[in-house]
Image (cartoon, rainbow, N blue to C red):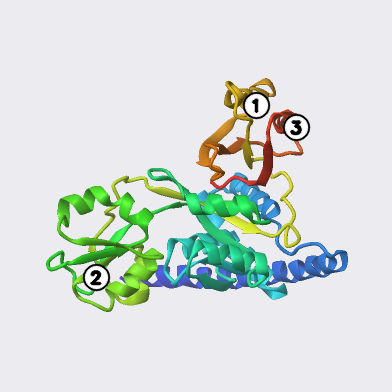
Amino acid sequence: MSDMKKDLSQLRAEIDAVDRELLAAVNRRASLANEVGDIKRGEGSPVFRPEREAQVINNLQAANPGPLKDGNVATIWREIMSACRALEAPQRVAYLGPAGTFSEQAAVQFFGSSIEHVPCVSFDEVFHAATAGTADFGVVAVENNSEGVVTRSLDLLLNTPLHIVGEVSLLVRHHLLRLSNSLEGIEAVMAHPQALAQCQGWLNKHLPNAERRAVSSNAEGARLASTNPAWAGIAGERAGTEFGLHIAAHAIQDDAFNRTRFAVICLPQTLQAPQASGNDCVSLVVSVPNRPGAVHDILVPLKQHGVSMTRFESRPARSGQWEYYFYIDVQGHPSQPHVAAALKDLQGLCAFYKVLGSYPVSD
């Protein structure tokens, strides 16, 4: 037993020594980051470069000898880079609030914890905050793998000057949260409409008589559930902790692999389109003349130039003429000749053409 205690003591001493080495190394990195920040300020260039941070993480993951998993490497270095950025100026990031939403989780996953939080009551307010300068960046849900696109986000992207500079893909687990750890006596379930839709099978089976109330966010549903023992909310574990609720039922989403994709948005003068990272996406919205074969024609340039399309969605143009906008994602970056050629040919076929953003693809 004494030898075991001695071995444990030695191991802890070695860990303490490594921790001090790590602290010294991180502080050296922070000092270098400050020097970089001085140069950037002199040049007038932005502090935050998402493609550079993506390359840093990708390079470290490629060099990772283990036993740390690549996902852990990404999480650790994203926090280090976030803390270094905050020494210059923490990013103000708007998202659908209140505290505890998946949008907040996506913001932290993308920028790290060292940000200035700007919670908003709606997607419209997120876009307004990023447009008006209340926030430097916004984070909004744009797509769910089971329920499809978030239409309000697409409409706002079409009609604002903001562009997409990054994305986050989040594994979303919805829990049923309430003041008691039971399914008995639930009269109403409150959540964002997307969450209610993603859990409708479970709700039909387990709470068929409970009223379903759509609210502005899942965290708002959790907050309301904390005010009435007969109410329940659907939200993530973070919201349950925030409002002191029990998880009455775990992971009630109908799709076990439920993922939501979030876009990181800002004004072009806040951050220009990121440079190529090696794994990029271009998002655009187009409309075509109302004639036979027009939709087919806009896909031809992509095929001719060998550009892969990863998303194709249509939305009514609200013109009263049965016209549609088409939201398209393609792999690659506009700096690549074959992508540039495909986009040029595509633009020539369109009655309306707008690039929503080019940015590194989320893991």
Q: Earlier in the sequence, mark 3 or mark 2?
A: 2
> Does 314 sit above or below residue 160?
above
> Does 141 sit above or below residue 351?
below
Instruction: Residue under label 1, please give it.
Output: 302
Image mark count: 3
Disc 3 and disc 2 in contact, CB within 8 angstroms: no
Tell whether 256 sits left or right of 75.
left
Q: Name the residue furthest bottom.
A: 227
Give x and y (percent) for residue 13: 50, 73
Q: Nearer the viewer, residue 56 or 319?
A: 319
Q: Amino acid at mark 1?
A: Leu
Question: Dividing the image into 4 quarters, which one contains the N terminus?
Answer: bottom left
Instruction: Residue under label 3, please give it.
Output: 344
Residue in view at x 25 percent, y 67 percent: 232
Instruction: Residue under label 2, please give it.
Output: 178
Give x and y (percent) for residue 109: 52, 60
* Residue at disc 1, secondary structure: helix
Give neighbour class at mark 1: few <14, some 14-19, many 20+ (Cα, 10 Å): many
* Residue at disc 3, secondary structure: helix
Residue in view at x 70 percent, y 29 percent: 349
Give x and y (percent) for residue 52: 70, 53
Residue in view at x 58 percent, y 27 percent: 295
Q: Nearer the viewer, residue 192 or 10?
A: 192
* Residue at disc 2, secondary structure: strand
Q: Amino acid at mark 2?
A: Arg
Q: Earlier in the sequence, mark 2 or mark 1?
A: 2
Q: Earlier in the sequence, mark 3 or mark 1?
A: 1
Give neighbour class at mark 3: few <14, some 14-19, many 20+ (Cα, 10 Å): few
